[in-house]
Image: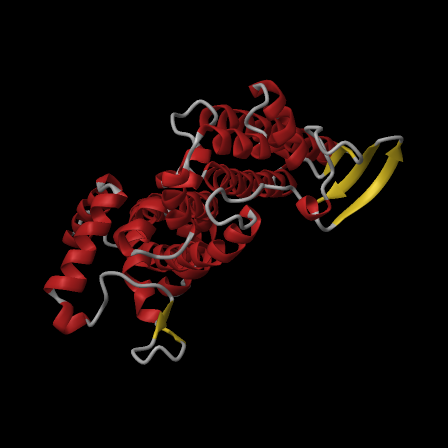
């Protein structure tokens, strides 16, 4: 029962955070300068056309009603008017499709649907479709970067702990400090310039490129995995630096425990003591940090993707900002926030299940 109460409490907190994010994002992008209708029309813009498009977008309504309409679009279970096309909550068949009508009362209907993130002002594509095409690229980049950071960070952390106060330990500390303090945008430019320009004859890496590249004859696309190396390296630098020092400190703490000294006194091989006993017990804080970093990488890959022209969520968000395509930017931000909230929620529930003391906080 305690576990159920703990899980429901965490879920409630997550929903409150999500509501706050939705509210902040909506009002932020509805007070920004710039007229999407004028951006859509370009040189053809005239007062009558702008008024028609703003009416079609629902931007002619008061901001409070626009906010309620936005919440209604996002909620899986929402209320709509099924007859009056001039109503703010008019149920259009092509707007929410597919949807399931749960209850109908007079002119109103309650429908079950996927959250509707609206359509792009520029391409008229559903924002959900744009995110679905871009997110796999960001997810792949984040997973590869996190895998690189984990493998190298664990290795350097263990070596630094075993060789404490040696030149290896001092060098690792310097590199870790540099990695944590170096901004991602600057690191991306520096790494692209060094490995894809200065050392291009040896590395054969591209400064820009996506996972799939059009061949020289224009007959199709092919998988170009080497374009993943530099953005993944750049994105993994900061978690690598953090995980290295965290692994080192955790290993030093575990190696000083009595059961480690007892295992050594019993004559167990040093390698077995280190990897089977010490490292295994030192991984808990590392795994905790890695889960948080993974969520952060999914959200923070914008600058890295922009520098390397990696066709992920970063390019989508920057392109949407440049074109005042507010639904795309708002939908992308909300999607990333939901992802972070879900990851944190799952992590909290797992902690509560593994350690009952967490539920008492």
Q: Does the rendering let one see residue 75?
A: yes
- Residue 229, compared with residue 298, is above or below; it is below
Task: Identify the residue at image location x=50%, y=44%.
Answer: 120
Q: Quadrant of the C terminus?
A: top right
Pick the front one: 337 or 216: 216
Pick the front one: 196 or 127: 127
- Residue 88, compared with residue 270, is above or below; it is above
Q: Position of residue 148 (x, y in %)?
A: 35, 59
Query: Quadrant location of residue 203?
Result: bottom left
Q: Position of residue 68 (x, y in %)?
A: 64, 25
- Residue 32, compared with residue 344, is above or below; it is above
Is 188 displayed left or right of 271 in the figure? left
Q: Position of residue 279 (x, y in %)?
A: 42, 55
- Residue 172, compared with residue 216, is above or below; it is above
Q: Does the rendering let one see residue 255?
A: no
Pick the front one: 255 or 116: 116
């Amino acid at each position: 029962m305690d576990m159920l109460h703990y899980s429901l409490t965490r879920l409630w907190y997550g929903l409150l955070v999500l509501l706050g994010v939705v509210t902040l994002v909506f009002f932020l992008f509805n007070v920004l300068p710039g007229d999407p209708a004028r951006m859509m029309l370009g040189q053809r813009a005239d007062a009558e056309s702008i008024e028609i498009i703003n009416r079609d977008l629902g931007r002619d309504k008061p901001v409070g009603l626009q906010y309620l309409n936005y919440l209604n679009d996002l909620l899986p279970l929402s209320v709509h008017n099924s007859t009056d096309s001039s109503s703010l909550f008019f149920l259009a068949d092509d707007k929410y499709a597919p949807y399931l009508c749960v209850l109908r009362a007079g002119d109103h209907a309650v429908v079950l649907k996927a959250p509707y993130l609206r359509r792009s002002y520029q391409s008229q594509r559903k924002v959900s479709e744009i995110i679905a095409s871009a997110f796999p690229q960001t997810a792949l980049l984040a997973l590869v970067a996190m895998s690189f950071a984990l493998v190298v960070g664990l290795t350097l952390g263990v070596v630094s702990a075993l060789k404490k106060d040696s030149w290896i330990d001092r060098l690792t500390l310097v590199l870790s400090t540099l990695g944590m303090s170096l901004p991602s945008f600057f690191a991306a430019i520096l790494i692209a310039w060094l490995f894809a320009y200065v050392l291009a004859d040896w590395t054969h890496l591209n400064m820009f490129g996506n996972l799939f590249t059009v061949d020289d004859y224009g007959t199709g696309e092919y998988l170009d995995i080497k374009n993943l190396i530099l953005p993944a390296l750049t994105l993994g630098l900061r978690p690598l630096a953090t995980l290295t020092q965290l692994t080192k400190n955790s290993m030093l703490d575990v190696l000083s425990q009595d059961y480690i000294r007892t295992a050594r006194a019993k004559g167990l091989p040093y390698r077995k003591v280190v990897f089977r006993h010490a490292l295994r017990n030192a991984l808990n804080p590392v795994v905790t940090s890695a889960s948080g970093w993974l969520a952060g990488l999914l959200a923070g890959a914008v600058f890295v993707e922009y520098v390397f022209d990696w066709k992920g969520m970063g390019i989508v968000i920057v392109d949407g900002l440049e074109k005042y395509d507010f639904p795309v930017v708002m939908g992308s931000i909300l999607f990333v926030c939901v992802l972070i909230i879900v990851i944190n929620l799952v992590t909290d529930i797992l902690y509560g299940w593994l350690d009952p003391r967490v539920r008492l906080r």
